[in-house]
Image (cartoon, rainbow, N blue to C red):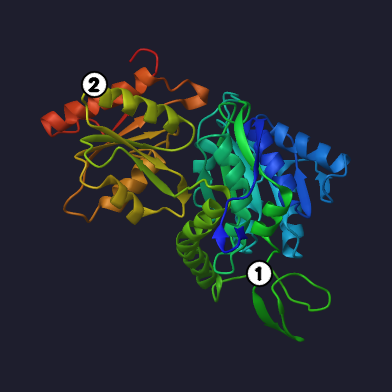
């Protein structure tokens, strides 16, 4: 916003919101055309609150109460394909049930926004947080952003529409928030007014295509017939997959631009990689989601003890920002990768494998060790994080990583 040529931030209101309510409130301000969802813990509050907005006439969204998550994503695909803005939300087993259509949404290049309240996948049945659901969908062609707190959830739930709908991107996006830790915990959240949000998000743009009746928008429209998602065999399928790869690469460029625009409006700056105390760090952890706040607290404590600890918050997991991570890591000798996910049968967790690939051909790289924590919602305490830093200090001293992956907080260790 501008006044007399001077850039000023939009007026904001302080609200007490949990993460789910932050998603719902941000989505109300965007006022999408269609919301289709099925309730599943810990996501349920999102669609409960949004249905109240619909019932109260605060939005003119068409709310579709479907019979399953598979139908929720199917409805979102159909709505988005016609040119509507479509939103949904899910968690864990719900994401697993919509699996087939998740891939279709990205393959059809539909800019759907979905809130994912990260929850452990069953079985045994567990309703609490880890990142196994989001990591399982890491190759589905969706952009993935992992949020640290309710404020970031609110901000990302608005900016996500611009990211997904950018004409050089046109991909669906998951706004990931840790189940219960964020979804059900009330925090102070600064919110913008509806007019400012509307102005920032704008109208949905469309790719221009050439059809039988001339040039038109890439969407299903009886006035300009075209086909989306036809049978695609050996002759073109490969090329269409490469188009998705290229769109992910383009997203890396434009997500930063949109985050900068959001900072100008809100005063809150985000980046896909956020280093903390890394300038002279000798040991550092990289992680995602709510636990990075605890890691940051531990770093401050260790610094007071004279230990040169650092931390990197990874906000954007897909597309994977390899070069930005390298820049943030710098010359730190030992890097610990802390993650709330196990990849069964693999040498390491998903984030660790991405980082090992990132550094594979580099002559200079940090010694790396994988620390798996917090599965099924188990608390990630400061003491557990300190245990990882203590282990990394030992690695720095000996120059050896004795074991690629280890767990912290498991009984009997």
Marks 1/2 in contact by CB < 8 Å: the verdict is: no
* Residue under the image location 47 percent in, 26 percent down: 375
The number of callouts visible is: 2
Q: Is residue 49 left or right of residue 317?
A: right
Q: CA distance from mark 1 to mark 2?
A: 62 Å
Q: Position of residue 388 (x, y in %)?
A: 30, 26
Name the element at disc 1.
loop
Task: Place residue 84 in its image quadrant.
Answer: bottom right
Residue at left offset 55%, top offset 64%: 169
Q: Residue at x 63, y 43 (%)?
A: 115
Q: Residue 235: x, y in percent? A: 55, 76
Task: For the C terminus, give its image quadrant.
Answer: top left
Mark 1, Cα crowd under 10 Å, few <14 / some 14-19 / many 20+, is: few
Name the one closer to the observer, 170 or 100: 170
Mark 2 Cα-neighbour bin, 10 Å: few <14, some 14–19, many ≥20: few
Q: Quadrant of the N terminus?
A: bottom right
Q: Nearer the viewer, mark 1 or mark 2?
A: 2
Image quadrant assignment for residue 111: bottom right
Question: Which residue is at the front of the view, 102 or 219?
Answer: 219
Answer with left or right where residue 307 lies relative to residue 24: left
The label number, if any, that marks residue 231 in the structure image: 1
**Label 2 sits on residue:** 305
SS at circle 2: loop
Q: Residue at x 24, y 47 (%)?
A: 330
């Amino acid at each position: 916003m501008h006044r007399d040529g001077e850039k000023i931030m939009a007026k904001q209101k302080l609200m007490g919101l949990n993460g789910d309510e932050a998603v719902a409130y941000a989505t109300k301000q965007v006022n999408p055309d269609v919301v289709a969802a099925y309730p599943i813990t810990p996501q349920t509050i999102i669609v409960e609150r949004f249905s109240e907005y619909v019932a109260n006439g605060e939005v003119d969204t068409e709310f579709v109460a479907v019979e399953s998550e598979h139908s929720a994503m199917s409805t979102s695909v159909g709505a988005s394909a016609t040119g509507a803005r479509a939103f949904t939300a899910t968690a864990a087993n719900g994401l697993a049930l919509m699996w087939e259509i998740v891939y279709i949404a990205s393959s059809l290049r539909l800019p759907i926004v979905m809130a994912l309240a990260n929850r452990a996948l069953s079985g045994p049945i567990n309703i609490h947080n880890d990142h196994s659901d989001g990591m399982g969908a890491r190759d589905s062609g969706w952009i993935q952003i992992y949020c640290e707190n309710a404020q970031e959830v609110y901000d990302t739930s608005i900016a996500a529409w611009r990211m997904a709908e950018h004409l050089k991107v046109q991909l669906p996006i998951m706004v990931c928030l840790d189940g219960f830790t964020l979804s059900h915990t009330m925090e102070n959240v600064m919110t913008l007014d509806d007019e400012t949000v509307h102005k920032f998000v704008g109208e949905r743009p469309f790719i221009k295509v050439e059809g039988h009746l001339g040039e038109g928008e890439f969407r299903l429209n009886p006035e300009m017939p075209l086909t989306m998602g036809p049978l695609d065999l050996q002759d073109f399928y490969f090329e269409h997959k490469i188009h998705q790869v290229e769109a992910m690469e383009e997203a890396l460029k434009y997500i930063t631009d949109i985050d900068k625009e959001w900072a100008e409006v809100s005063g809150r700056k985000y980046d896909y990689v956020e280093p903390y105390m890394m300038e002279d760090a000798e040991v550092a952890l990289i992680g995602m989601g709510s636990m990075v706040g605890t890691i940051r607290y531990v770093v401050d404590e260790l610094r007071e003890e004279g230990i040169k600890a650092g931390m990197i918050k990874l906000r954007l997991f897909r597309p994977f920002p390899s070069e930005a991570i390298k820049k943030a890591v710098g010359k730190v000798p030992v890097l610990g990768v802390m993650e709330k996910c196990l990849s069964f049968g693999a040498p390491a967790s998903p984030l660790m494998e991405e980082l090992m690939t990132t550094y594979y051909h580099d002559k200079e790289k940090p010694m790396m060790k994988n620390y798996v924590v917090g599965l099924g919602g188990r608390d990630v305490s400061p003491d557990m994080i300190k245990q990882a830093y203590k282990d990394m200090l030992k690695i720095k001293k000996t120059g050896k990583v004795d074991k690629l992956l280890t767990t912290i907080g498991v009984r009997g260790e």
